[in-house]
Image (tube, rainbow, N blue to C red):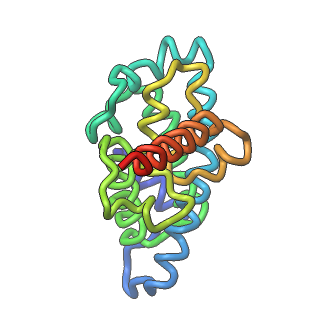
């Protein structure tokens, strides 16, 4: 953190008036989410290789049923490795400090929500079709490291494109069929 301000200042971050418009802020944050999800997917997938999982990522998977704080419970090397995914977007665009703060707040809230262990009626996955949410990420924590899938941080498109969510989709379909059969019995 000591080095982040000089680095971001060097890359074009500003903190002076005027503040950016809400359209600029929203566009940059959407760009950050898409880029972060892409970089995170590949980094997270690499962390599930045998050696890295055993020596680094297994700390994060200590809990098979995640809760909000497990989102930040990780090996220091993993925090640096996956933290890069969070800052690469702002490093490219050199945002206003307000945009950077909003991005960090929204990103941490999304991470905690994905690890909360609950699928609420107001969960974003009920409104945004490509958003993974807690249900999507809970599946990832329940399985053995080499076959877990669901590596994306926010959205599901990378897992869908590369087929790493096949087990999750199959389980969802089986649950749906089971629920339909249960409702027919009554």
Location of residue 86 in the rendering, given as x and y in whole percent from the top left corner:
49, 50
Task: Name the side, left or right, on which 80 lies relative to 1.
Answer: right
| Picture layout, residue 122 above or below residue 58 | below
Q: Is residue 46 above or below residue 14?
A: above
Q: What residue sits 67% from the left and 47% below the top?
A: 160
Q: Between residues 167 and 72, which one lies in front from this camera angle?
A: 167
For the point 37% across and 28% down, the residue is 74
Is 64 located above or below residue 183 in the figure? above
Q: Quadrant of residue 14?
A: bottom left
Q: Nearer the viewer, residue 174 or 155?
A: 174
- Tell me if 118 is positioned left or right of 156 in this view: left
Where residue 128 sits in the image (x, y, percent)?
A: 50, 66
Looking at the image, the residue that sits furthest to the front is: 185
At horizontal 37% and vertical 85% (from top left) the residue drawn is 17
Relative to 101, say whether 41 is above or below: above
Provide residue 156's location: percent of width, then percent of height: 58, 51
Q: Is residue 75 visible?
A: no
Quadrant hosting residue 130:
bottom right
**Quadrant housing residue 117:** top left
Locate residue 70 relative to residue 167 in the image: left or right.
left
Is 102 displayed left or right of 82 in the figure?
A: left
């Amino acid at each position: 953190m000591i080095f982040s301000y000089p680095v971001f200042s060097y890359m074009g971050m500003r903190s002076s008036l005027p503040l950016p418009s809400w359209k600029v802020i929203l566009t940059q944050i959407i760009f950050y989410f898409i880029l972060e999800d892409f970089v995170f997917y590949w980094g997270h997938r690499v962390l599930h290789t045998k050696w890295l999982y055993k020596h680094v990522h297994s700390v994060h998977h200590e809990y098979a049923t995640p809760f909000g704080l497990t989102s930040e419970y990780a090996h220091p090397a993993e925090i640096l490795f996956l933290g890069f995914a969070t800052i690469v977007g702002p490093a490219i665009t050199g945002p206003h400090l307000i945009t950077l703060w909003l991005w960090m707040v929204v990103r941490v809230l999304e991470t905690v929500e994905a690890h909360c262990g609950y699928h609420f009626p107001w969960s974003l996955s009920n409104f945004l079709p490509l958003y993974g949410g807690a249900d999507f990420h809970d599946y990832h924590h329940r399985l053995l490291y080499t076959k877990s899938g669901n590596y994306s941080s926010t959205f599901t498109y990378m897992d869908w494109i590369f087929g790493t969510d096949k087990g999750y989709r199959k389980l969802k379909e089986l649950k749906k069929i089971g629920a339909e059969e249960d409702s027919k019995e009554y």
